[in-house]
Amino acid sequence: MDTEAKADALEDFMMERLNETGSGKGDSGKYPTMAEVEAQIETRRHRRGVGNLFLSHTGNVKKLPAMPAKPTLADFFKLRFNVTSNHVLQSANLAMKNGMSEEVILACLLHDTAQELIKVDHGWWSAQLYEPYVSEKVAFAIRYHQALRFYADPSVGYEYPDLYRVLFGEDYKPEPYVEAAYQMVRNHKWYMEPRMVTVNDLYSFEPGVNPEIEQFTDIIGRHFKQPKEGLGFDNSSVAHIWRSIARPDSPL
Ligand SMILES: [Fe+2]
Ligand SMILES: [Fe+2]
């Protein structure tokens, strides 16, 4: 993707969320309430948790380019992670600039990519997708960034995101399973792994900064066990998930 296309993709990523609840704060200049967010469900033809690959908010979906016979992670970034790639590349780039460990940088690079398939519980879905290929610590960071996003940690400068007031409603309280996950992670020795994903999980688009997947080739090489048969064809427990991302136009 060229620079402009990337900026567009990031904007899509943000706008898709804002569009879901109208103009963000709304005419009154206030964030919506949970009741207002819920009232919008029956105004749509789709459910909000649908993955980016399966829906276009701007006209018909486009034909996707063919995947190589033995697809790598980089192939998925270039050919399928169309809406999420710029956001996660920006996050990983920021984590690199902030001197994070290679495992945190990798977790940032992967953290939201399962949103191409499904947005609901995307931390858990993303972690499952990558679990056979990354360390336990990286999978932990990916899985729990989702829960930690709802909880501020002033000691590392992480605040509750305004975007979530728009998406969930200003009076939203996280589901009990999210609260329980947070409490568990808060006391876990690896707490800072997912926390650092949230710290570097920014939606801001830095002008002139357009990280490419190649910037992370070495980190991927050291920390991602690319299957020789290609992602989707290694008979792993998640191969079908990779195939579903590769072939979203398949009717069955
Ligand atoms: Fe996320
Ligand atoms: Fe993110």
Image (cartoon, helix red, strand yellow):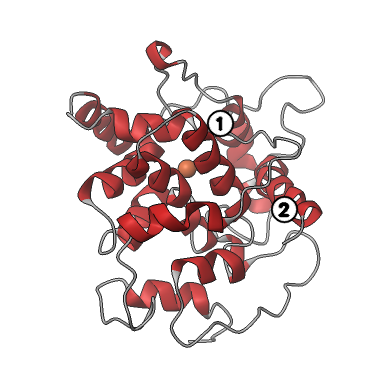
Spot occupied by residue 74 in the image (x, y as percentages of width and height): 50, 66
- Point out the residue furthest to the top here: 155
Say which residue appears at 66% left-offset and 48% top-offset.
Answer: 13
Could you say which is closer to the camera, residue 35 or residue 246? 246
Say which residue appears at 62% left-offset and 48% top-offset.
Answer: 211
Numbered tag placed on residue 110 in the rendering: none
Say which residue appears at 73% left-offset and 45% top-offset.
Answer: 11
The residue to which callout 2 is attached is: 6
The amino acid on which the numbered mark 2 sits, given as a three-letter code, is: Lys
- Point out the residue furthest to the front here: 218
**Residue 121 visible within the image:** no
**Residue 208 visible within the image:** yes
The residue to which callout 1 is attached is: 164
Q: Secondary structure at mark 1?
A: helix
User: For the residues marked 1 and 2, what is the alpha-carbon distance in whole angstroms?
Assistant: 23 Å
The amino acid on which the numbered mark 1 sits, given as a three-letter code, is: Tyr
Q: Give the mark nearest the N terminus, 1 or 2.
A: 2
Quarter of the image where one finds residue 85: bottom right
Spot occupied by residue 153 in the image (x, y as percentages of width and height): 39, 17
